[in-house]
């Protein structure tokens, strides 16, 4: 999300089972409050709506690319083999195998979007 210009605080991945309704309510309430504190998308990030739109379009295109999906699949295989599901292991493996590909793909997609004038079309 940072690569696309969006604060990572705008994303949360938490776990609560169906039997943990109070925990679920707490997680959602905390996340909603955090988003309210950040304000509208783009404002907290300090970027214009046009720039944000460009980056999000490029990020979406990058995530949809076959090349990147292949890297994610290989990363998942590596994690399975090594039983490395701790957050710090996943973060390190992402940095090693995927992040640079994401950055390159987003840069390529941004260039394509600007060249084709697709920003205002969507």
Image (cartoon, rainbow, N blue to C red):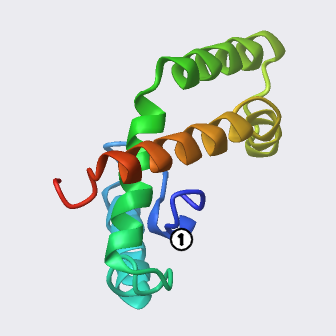
The residue under the point 39% across, 55% down is: 56
The residue under the point 39% across, 42% down is: 60
- Is residue 16 visible in the rendered structure shown here? no
Tell me the SS state at disc 1: loop
Q: Position of residue 120 (x, y in %)?
A: 20, 61
The residue under the point 31% across, 57% down is: 21
The residue under the point 57% across, 37% down is: 105
Residue 55 position (above or below residue 28): above
**Residue farthest toward the left in the current orientation of the protein:** 121
Q: Nearer the viewer, residue 83 or 37?
A: 37
Q: Position of residue 69 (x, y in %)?
A: 52, 21
In terms of image quadrants, where is residue 79? top right
Residue 115 position (above or below residue 120): above
Q: Position of residue 11 (x, y in %)?
A: 46, 60
- Is residue 94 visible in the rendered structure shown here? yes
Q: Is residue 9 left or right of residue 75?
A: left
Residue 10 position (above or below residue 20): below
**Residue farthest toward the front in the current orientation of the protein:** 115
Count every numbered label the image shows and give the total.
Answer: 1
Q: Position of residue 99 (x, y in %)?
A: 70, 41
Q: Which residue is mark 1?
A: 7
Residue 110 position (above or below residue 23): above
Q: Could you classify mark 1 by the number of other residues whose Cα lies within 10 Å: few (under 14), some (14-19), or many (20 or more)? A: some
């Amino acid at each position: 999300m940072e690569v696309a210009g969006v604060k990572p605080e705008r994303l949360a991945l938490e776990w609560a089972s169906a039997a943990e309704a109070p925990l679920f309510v707490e997680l959602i309430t905390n996340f909603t409050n955090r988003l309210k504190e950040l304000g509208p998308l783009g404002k907290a990030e300090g970027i214009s709506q046009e720039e944000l739109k460009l980056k999000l379009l490029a990020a979406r295109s990058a995530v949809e690319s076959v090349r990147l999906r292949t890297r994610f699949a290989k990363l998942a295989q590596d994690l399975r083999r090594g039983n490395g599901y701790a957050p710090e292991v996943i973060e390190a493996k992402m940095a090693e195998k995927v992040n640079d590909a994401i950055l390159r793909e987003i840069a390529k997609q941004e260039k394509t979007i600007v060249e084709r004038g697709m920003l205002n079309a969507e």
